[in-house]
Amino acid sequence: MAIDIKHVNTGTHNRVGTSSANKSQQSSSQAAGAAAQTVKGDSVSITSQAQQLQSAQAKLNDIPEVDIKKVEEIKAAIAEGRYKIDAEKLASNIEQFENELRDLN
């Protein structure tokens, strides 16, 4: 439920040149109106988009930053001399990464 702030102080009236008795009466009526609004209670709702983002963030937090299994596989391949570098694939990946960075600007 969204909060409508357009009509928050609808019960207050500002008059120029009022006496201090009127001002005191106005401030007490304002306080009563504020108390009545407080009694209703506040509520917050989260949009479905925000809920999806929150869910995605929780899933990302569960994923380790480094894939230990992949690191071990690469270490073993290097140690055994089976690790080959595909220069064309590497160049293509670098180009794709640079294009993505350029698109961000």
Image (cartoon, helix red, strand yellow):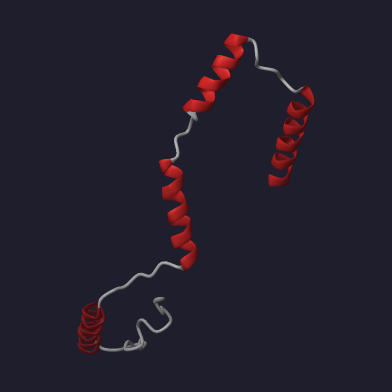
**Measuring 53% from the left and 26% from the top, which residue is drawn there?**
70
User: What is the quadrant of residue 43 in the picture?
Assistant: bottom left
Residue 83 appears at what percent x and percent y? 65, 16
* Count of numbered badges drawn on the protein: 0
34, 29: nearer the viewer: 34
Asked if residue 105 can be seen in this view, the reply is: no
Residue 16 appears at what percent x and percent y? 37, 87
93, 78: nearer the viewer: 78
User: What is the quadrant of residue 26 in the picture?
Assistant: bottom left
Q: Is residue 36 above or below residue 83?
A: below
Q: Quadrant of the N terminus?
A: bottom left
Q: Is residue 96 above or below residue 4?
A: above
Q: Is residue 86 above or below residue 101?
A: above
Q: Residue furthest right?
A: 88
User: What is the quadrant of residue 84 in the picture?
Assistant: top right
**Does residue 43 appear left or right of residue 54 in this picture?**
left
Asked if residue 11 can be seen in this view, the reply is: yes
